[in-house]
Image (cartoon, helix red, strand yellow):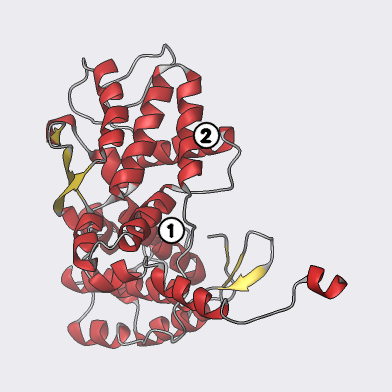
Amino acid sequence: MTEIVSGAAPYLPDVPPGPPARNPYLVYLKSLGGAQSRRTMGGCLDRIARILGYTTGETVPWGLLRYQHAAALRSELVNQVHLDADGELVPWSPSSVNKHLSALRQVLYHAWMLGQMTAEDYHRAKAVKNVKGGTRAKAGRNVAEHEVAAMLKACLAAGDLIGIRDAAVIAVLQSTGMRRDELAKATRANYDPGDRRLLITGKGGKSREVYLHEVAAVYLGRWLAATEHIRGPLIAPVNRWGAATARHLSPDAIAAALERRRRQAGLPRLSPHDLRRTFAGDLLDNGVDLARVQQLMGHASPVTTSGYDRRPGRQRRAAVDTLTLPRPEDLAT
């Protein structure tokens, strides 16, 4: 998000940040289970810090915030705008504002737990309400089967170890609905090729089992066979000499691999989460019950999983298709 910060919340004194173990910003981010969650919430707090006149969230004296600061921040967040894909200024969505408010409440909670504000001041400051608004459609798109095939073809055409690895990455993401962070942390010891079962660690440090499609297992098997000397990471970087190294491929590198093959295949923009979205939508389309899809996706609530259900939209489209409208060729005759 490219935000445009304007205005400022009420003045806070310039207090040097404390040591890491006493810094609410750092303590809160460290409490989050996943790297993606830390990036997301850290980004929210950094934006709030800039509204307050600080460079990053690490330098904000969070324990000095009071209700008037939180209320002013809420007002500033509601007025924030960002540049969309077309370069137009658009306001933040209610869900984006509320995500920032959630980050604010959490860092205030840790400031209270660290003894940097009283319980009364904490409860007053966190009492600012979320903004109301309609539910925004989830970002991203569904990925068609022929698009996955085109990216896999681009991987195989490379004829090198990176191509073999990227094909495995795409096939595993497409057939499991894993988050890129989860794939980045996956280990070889937790993969059972006989059952095509992979034990992964998701959000909040929770473990779950995912299962690979039999064809995805073939792509992954080629990568594992080509790098059988590696112990530890399931997916690893390949160095400039074309050899795999015993390190975990980062989440950003996984996204970069997908972007590289997407470009080579000449496809519209897509992200790793689009493969996750498609996985959930395809299962629901195929009649898999919501609870089972929820388990495979690692969602804490079925409400989150239902947001990936494409069937209601298709039913509404089918209803519109019952209407009649004259075709141009009918009018020409």
Q: How many numbered dots are placed on residues in this image?
A: 2
Q: Quadrant of residue 211?
A: top left
Q: Nearer the viewer, residue 105 or 163?
A: 163
Q: Is residue 327 left or right of residue 282?
A: right
- Is disc 1 surrounded by few (<14), some (14 to 19) or many (20+) residues within 10 Å? some
Q: Position of residue 9 (x, y in %)?
A: 49, 78
**Of callouts 1 and 2, the N-terminal one:** 1
Q: Position of residue 263 (x, y in %)?
A: 58, 37
Going by the numbered disc 1, the residue's amino acid type is Thr
How far is the residue under mark 1 from the one under mark 2? 32 Å
Residue at the image position 45 percent from the left and 45 percent from the top: 145
Going by the numbered disc 2, the residue's amino acid type is Arg
Q: Position of residue 173 (x, y in %)?
A: 34, 43
Mark carried by residue 245: none
User: Which quadrant does the C terminus fall into?
Assistant: bottom right
Residue at the image position 33 percent from the left and 74 percent from the top: 102
Q: Is residue 270 left or right of residue 67?
A: right
Q: Position of residue 107 (x, y in %)?
A: 29, 69
Q: Is residue 332 left or right of residue 111?
A: right
Mark carried by residue 56: 1
Q: Callout 1: helix, strand or loop?
A: loop
Q: Nearer the viewer, residue 187 or 215?
A: 215
Q: Quadrant of residue 112?
A: bottom left
When the figure is inspected, residue 306 is found, relative to residue 262, above or below; the finding is: below
Mark carried by residue 260: 2
Q: Nearer the viewer, residue 107 or 257?
A: 257
Q: Callout 2: helix, strand or loop?
A: helix
Q: Is residue 167 left or right of residue 112?
A: right
